[in-house]
Amino acid sequence: MGLIDQMRGGDRRALSRLVTIVENGGDDGHRALAKLYQHTGKAHIIGVTGPPGAGKSTLVNELTLDLRRRGHSVGILAVDPTSPFTGGAILGDRIRMQPLGHDPEIFVRSMASRGQLGGIARATGDVIKVLDAAGFDKIIVETVGAGQAEVEIAREAHTTVVVEVPGLGDDVQAIKAGILEIADVFVVNKADREDAEKTRRHLQTMMQLGAAPREGWSVPIVMTVATKGTGIAETVEAIEGHWRHLMQTGHLARRERGRIVREFQTILQGLALELVRERVPESQREALLTRIQEREIDPYTAAERILAEALGVAELK
């Protein structure tokens, strides 16, 4: 029995090995994804993002336990900042997700961001496919938590949960960075603080001043105290409600189409660059870069010429 069959049969060690293979990329990773792909496209992908100190990990723990009580299996990808010393994730799943470790219907994996901007790792989308093919109903992706620029998660997730916390002053910054536009559910965590209601009102005002509800969905604001389990059921209801909304309105298919288009274009760009590197000598590429720097040729014309040479055609257009 192959590794993929073992994984789909519930073997968690096979799942871990496949996640590692795909995360490392290369030919082995691509071959594994090619075989897995037919089994993907069924899971509900939930992104959880927000500033450091918002309590995202505690919230993810509690959401997972609630989803399990509702009968769902849950895969968790926790993206952590990359250690400058080891290159690995600074915080591991074994540290912060220990309460979930003994349930066979829960799988937790940490991923190092490896310098990737946007709050997720380069291979996050591919690892999501592995968990999807493994049969998890819900896949939760917790972003790095490095700031207000973590909008990439909205490209991968069906439902994006943005966590705010009173007293950090993130409300104004969030608006600047477009966080409002990616939220499908807002959570004000640590709602037992005295200025929590002020944060909720501020978010409500900002949404009323903004554009019309995205895809016909009015973003709910849920107040939680994750450390006490307060508001967790309401948050899961909001997430499930958004999932039903996407399916019933047809927006799920449109989002999936947009995600596939972006992914396909990114892969094509990578392959084109790889082709140029393989077929055009480095000295020639360097010479062309020098000509661009000296303003002898513009970057678009240079790119067309070098790609045409890699493809063995006279010109692209």
Image (tube, rainbow, N blue to C red):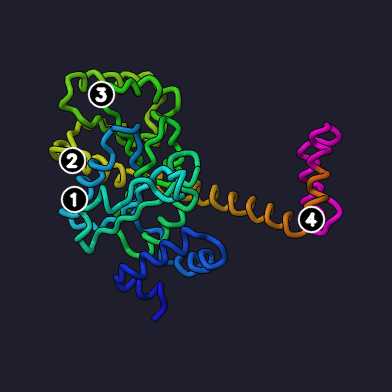
Is 161 situated above or below 86?
above
Q: Quadrant of the N terminus?
A: bottom left
Whole-percent x and y of residue 228? 13, 38
Q: Is residue 141 magenta?
A: no
Q: Are marks 4 and 3 in contact (CB under 8 Å)?
A: no
From mark 4 to mark 2, how far is it between C-alphas?
Answer: 56 Å
Mark closer to the observer (4, 1): 4
Residue hosting label 4: 280
Q: Is residue 313 magenta?
A: yes
Comes first in the chain, label 3 or label 1: 1
Residue 65, numbered circle: 1
Whole-percent x and y of residue 166? 25, 23
- Quarter of the image holding residue 69? bottom left
| Left or right: 13, with 290 as reference point | left
From mark 4 to mark 3, how far is it between C-alphas?
Answer: 55 Å
Residue 166, numbered circle: 3
Residue hosting label 2: 232
Q: Are marks 3 and 1 in contact (CB under 8 Å)?
A: no
Residue ID at (21%, 54%)? 100
From mark 4 to mark 1, how far is it between C-alphas?
Answer: 54 Å
Secondary structure of the residue carrying tag 3 is: loop
Q: Which residues are magenta?
A: 289-317
**Which one is in front, 52 or 239?**
52
Comes first in the chain, label 1 or label 2: 1
Q: Amino acid at mark 2?
A: Ile
